[in-house]
Image: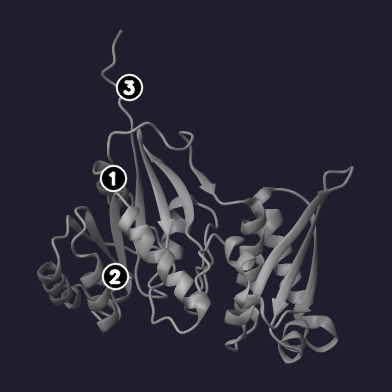
Amino acid sequence: MNTQNTQTYSGFVAIVGPTNAGKSTLLNQIMGRKVSIVSHKVQTTRTNLRAVKMVGTRQLIFVDTPGVFVPKRRLDRAMVGAAMTAISDADAVLLIMDAQKGITQTIRDLVEKIHGHKNLFVALNKVDAIKKQDLLPIVAELSQMADWREIFMISALKNDGVDGMLDALAAVMPASPYMFDASDAVDVPDNLYLSELTREKIYKYIHQELPYHINVLTERVDVDADGVLDIYQKIAVQNDAHKKIVIGRGGEQLKQIGTAARHDIQDQWGVNARLHLFVRVEPDWENKAENYEDQGLEFTK
């Protein structure tokens, strides 16, 4: 029996970086579907969404961590804690940074936290937006900051340089049985994924700081005789003023959010769906453990 080609490799890759560096865009590009919220606002990735990508016979399990920032609230602390846990558990760490912004203090602080990892990579994202000669001093300084296995030049949005990066990451995955089926997939409960899609639309259409004080919970999903999904979601806000903003004049804002989310859900799953959104005032939702557990976060006092 020939066992030469039976060895399998599987491991975790933690994607880390400042808010809005392009982490979620990169993961969505790798998977060819929406995995994590893409938004112009910061702190939009709350949970450690796992995405499984096969590169030949090697399995990469991506953990998209919340953007690292200074925590101010309990939810913030849970998000940053999730990011740090993902880093310590990973077989490789991929730092994503915005080439246009260069090496900021946030990057310096983050490199200080991760520089001891044995498989450390950095991806300079959005390199298509700046001149090549402007990249040279950034690369030179990065090289002095940590023992990187490789520094990649990529455009996550345009999918430039991503395949080579995946090959390099796959090369350091440990010999291991596959931890997931040998196919590309997202390891996130469907209800949570549905909530994420709706929350993305709230970020898109509501431009105040309000979205960071909002929770979306998929309460149930029913299927009728024709195979149409009926999705019931609760949008929890902290006060009546926030409720009015989400609903909008004559309900127009909520209708816009619901229509956009429903279209995304139908496009992602190839199904027909009806989305039922209910806005409820829950002033203390950030202090309830179950709201963190629903999002895969640890509730800390």
Kind of residue at badge 1: Asp
Is residue 1 placed above or below 33 in the rendered structure?
above
Q: Quadrant of residue 86?
A: bottom left
Label whose residue precedes the other's in the sequence (1 or 3): 3
Label whose residue precedes the other's in the sequence (2 or 1): 2
Q: Say which element carries label 2.
A: helix
Residue 9: x and y in percent read: 32, 35
Q: Disc 2 marks which residue?
A: 127
Say whether residue 245 is left or right of residue 225: left
Q: Are marks 2 and 1 in contact (CB under 8 Å)?
A: no
Residue 141: x and y in percent read: 13, 74
Q: Residue at x 54, y 66 (%)?
A: 37
Q: Disc 1 marks which residue?
A: 167
Nearest-to-viewer mark from 1 and 3: 3
Q: Residue at x 25, y 79 (%)?
A: 102
Kind of residue at badge 3: Thr
Instruction: Count the numbered circles shown.
Output: 3
Q: Disc 3 marks which residue?
A: 6
Say whether residue 20 is left or right of residue 291: left
Q: Residues within 10 Å of mark 2 (few under 14, many from 20)?
A: many
Q: Residues within 10 Å of mark 3 (few under 14, many from 20)?
A: few
